[in-house]
Image (tube, helix red, strand yellow):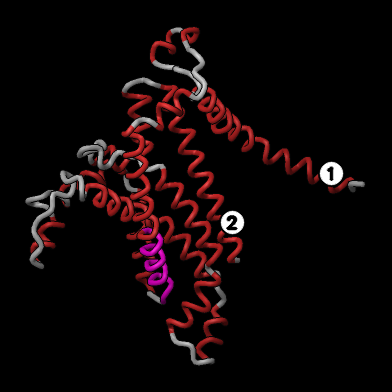
Amino acid sequence: MTAPGSARETRAGWAFTAPALLLIAVFFVLPALGALALSFTDFDIYSIGNPADTRFVGLGNYRDLLGNPVFWIALRNTGFFVLLGVPLSIALSLGAALLLNTRLGRWGGFFRTAYFTPYVTTLVAVAIVWRYLYHPQYGWVNATLGAVGIHPIDWLGSPRWAMVAIVLLSVWKGFGYTMVVFLAGLQSIPEELYEAGRLDGAGPWRQFRHITLPLLRPTFLFVAVITFIGYCQVFAEPYVMTQGGPLKSTTSIVLFMYEEGFRWWRIGPAAAIAVVLFLIMLVATAVQLRFRREEL
């Protein structure tokens, strides 16, 4: 039997969460269900004017998608982006957090602001700067490589290097957020543990391996999941920098979906792409969560 006070707390809890749940239902659940329904139809630009022209095609959009070579190119590009970008982003953000967690005195706030600034900077402004940095003749990147005897690279014009260039841009722009998360996790570790480790003769590496890393596992789980999800949805960087080229070498799943839905107005196939991407992220995230929980 539920106590009266507990019932009041339950009602109060629902009252406080109801606005957020309503917003989630309106702006997430309903659009997701709508996209799922559209993925089984041939909804296009003509259907917008007359919805009665929409036909139910079942799994036809999914069959066509699996037979589309551009989809597999986009899937491969997105996989490369995730496999290269996620480890780089986590390593860079963890390294920056470790540096900031040291006693930097009055300079700590400056470096926190400097590292976090790219994350909140408009992507268009960042892209303009990085396009100059990547310029094959006058860019700073090639000038630096030339100083050590490496020939200039056409970063954004070469199918071999374009995605690498996009990954470096994305890592530089986004690592500030995960750095803050890692920094919060580091600052939650009691200093007494490090003092005990030093008394036992543990050096910096052993302290990092046996104290820092084990206690950061929950933080690693959170950072890995949100970074993976974010990199699976990469769109703005290739759209602004290369428009998916050259030769589709930087076309991501979301960019492919955008082109299908808002360039060619094939809304049904675009919705099918969104559903496939959602399932990929759902399965991969579930695997990460289960693997990390077993470690914990």
Residue 98 — which label? none
Using a 10 Å C-alpha cutoff, classify the residue at mark 1 as few (fewer than 14 neighbours), some (14 to 19) or many (20 or more).
few
Q: Position of residue 120 (x, y in %)?
A: 36, 49
Instruction: For mark 2, give the secondary structure.
Output: helix
What is the three-letter code of the residue carrying label 2? Arg
The majority secondary structure of the magenta stretch comes to: helix
Magenta region includes residue 276:
no
User: Which residues are drawn in magenta?
Assistant: 89-102
In the rendered structure, the answer to whether residue 103 lies left or right of residue 118 reads right
Residue 290 — which label? 2
Q: Residue at x 35, y 54 (%)?
A: 85
In the rendered structure, the answer to whether residue 103 lies left or right of residue 215 reads left
- Provide the residue designation for mark 1: 7
Residue 178 drawn above or below residue 262? below
Q: Earlier in the sequence, mark 2 or mark 1?
A: 1
For residue 105, which quarter of the picture?
A: bottom left
Q: Nearer the viewer, mark 2 or mark 1?
A: 2
Q: Position of residue 217 (x, y in %)?
A: 54, 66
Residue 244 drawn above or below residue 38? below
Instruction: For mark 1, give the secondary structure.
Output: helix
Q: Nearer the viewer, residue 203 or 21?
A: 203
What is the three-letter code of the residue carrying label 1? Ala
Find out whether the residues at labels 2 and 1 contact each other: C-beta distance under 8 Å. Answer: no
For residue 260, which quarter of the picture?
A: top left
Q: Residue at x 17, y 52 (%)?
A: 133
For residue 192, which quarter of the picture?
A: bottom right
Q: Position of residue 49 (x, y in %)?
A: 42, 9
The answer for how far apart the CA atoms under marks 2 and 1 are is 34 Å
In the rendered structure, the answer to whether residue 68 lies left or right of residue 4 reads left
Q: Residue at x 39, y 62 (%)?
A: 93
